[in-house]
Image (cartoon, grey):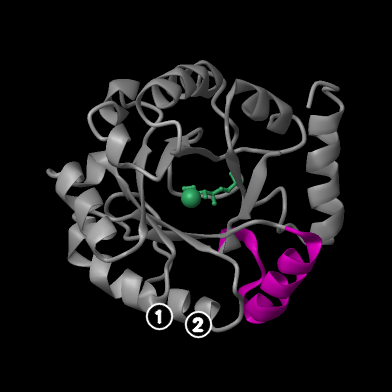
């Protein structure tokens, strides 16, 4: 079954603890935290302090997605804050391999993220080292954007690459996953779907999650 990682980006931050408890009770798998620096992406969000606060209110794996330049500067801070998975962007560092190795040295699961405009081959040399391959299906920076349709073919190719080079690595898709697109990404090979606005949108998380799962069951094949 597809795992779900709700992004707190679209949650009500004045009641974050309740929002996370609600998501946990609904049966989500991970909590996804989008860290943005206003440089790698136009938007600014939060740093290790918030990750540390979230750590104190849930036992779910914390999936930290770093959209910051030179992420190696902060890997230790996020590890100490209680991140379980730390994902760096291929485009944000001169040395993605070194950054991934460092995450592993810190005892965390290592992810590499690739933007919609970056050739998929960026994953290839690093795949044997990765725990997580994160394929962006929107340009990073904001929740609530539309899924970029070419992501589906890229997911299929990434799955082939993953099956060949490192079957234990999970494929995560991030951006625009909703009732209309979730079945497509699942069928294309995603193991984990990040969902912001489809899960945290003012309606009950359980209801939203059920709708996403039903969209997959409607396929009838899994
Ligand atoms: C985008 C972030 C995503 C985003 C997903 O830069 O990496 O995690 O919050 O939000 P939705 O699901 O609304 O596209
Ligand atoms: Zn993200």
Tell me, yes or no, if residue 203 can be seen here: no
Residue 122 drawn in magenta: no
Return the residue nearer the eye: 156 or 194: 156
Q: Give yes or no for contact between labels 1 and 2 (Cβ–Cβ under 8 Å).
A: yes
Q: Pick the residue in front: 3 or 10.
A: 3
**Is residue 99 in view from this perspective?**
yes
- Magenta span includes 20: yes
Prevalent SS, magenta region: helix
Q: Residue at x 87, y 54 (%)?
A: 207
Q: Vertical placement of 98 versus 150: above or below?
A: below
In the orientation shown, which residue stands out farthest toward the left?
94
Magenta-tinted stretch: 9-27
Decide if residue 192 is on the left or right side of residue 117. Answer: right
In the picture, the disc for residue 53 is 2
Looking at the image, residue 3 sits to the left or right of residue 82; the answer is right
Residue 138's x, y, as percent? 49, 35
Image-based side of 193 in relation to 115, left or right:
right
Q: Quadrant of residue 121?
A: top left
Q: Residues within 10 Å of mark 2 (few under 14, many from 20)?
A: some
Instruction: Report which quarter residue 13 is drawn in.
Output: bottom right
Quadrant (top left, top right, bottom left, bottom right) of the N terminus:
top right
Q: Name the residue rendered at 64%, 38% in the picture.
A: 177
Quadrant housing the C terminus: top right
Under tag 2, what secondary structure? helix
Q: Secondary structure at mark 1?
A: helix
**In the rendered image, the vertical position of residue 152 relative to residue 95, given as above or below:** above
Question: Residue at image x 58%, y 42%?
Answer: 192
- The image shows residue 104 at horizontal and vertical percentages of 27, 57
Query: CA–CA distance between discs 1 and 2?
Result: 6 Å
Number of the label disc, if any, that sits on residue 49: 1
Percent position of residue 140, x then y:
43, 44
């Amino acid at each position: 079954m597809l795992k779900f990682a709700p992004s707190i980006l679209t949650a009500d931050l004045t009641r974050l603890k309740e929002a996370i408890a609600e998501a946990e009770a609904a049966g989500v798998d991970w909590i996804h935290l989008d860290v943005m620096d206003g440089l790698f992406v136009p938007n600014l969000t939060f740093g290790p302090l918030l990750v540390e606060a979230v750590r104190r209110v849930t036992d779910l794996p914390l999936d930290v997605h770093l959209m910051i330049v030179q992420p190696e500067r902060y890997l230790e801070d996020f590890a100490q804050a209680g991140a379980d998975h730390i994902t760096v962007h291929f485009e944000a560092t001169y040395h993605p391999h070194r950054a991934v190795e460092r995450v592993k040295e810190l005892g965390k699961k290592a992810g590499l993220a690739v933007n919609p405009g970056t050739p998929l081959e960026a994953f290839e040399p690093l795949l044997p080292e990765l725990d997580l391959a994160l394929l962006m299906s929107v340009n990073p920076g904001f929740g609530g954007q539309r899924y970029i349709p070419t992501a589906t073919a890229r997911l299929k190719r990434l799955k082939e690459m993953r099956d060949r080079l490192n079957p234990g690595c999970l494929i995560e898709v991030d951006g625009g996953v909703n009732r209309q697109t979730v079945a497509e990404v699942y069928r294309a090979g995603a193991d984990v779907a990040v969902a912001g606005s489809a899960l945290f949108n003012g309606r009950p998380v359980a209801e939203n999650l059920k709708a996403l799962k039903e969209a997959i069951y409607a396929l009838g094949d899994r």
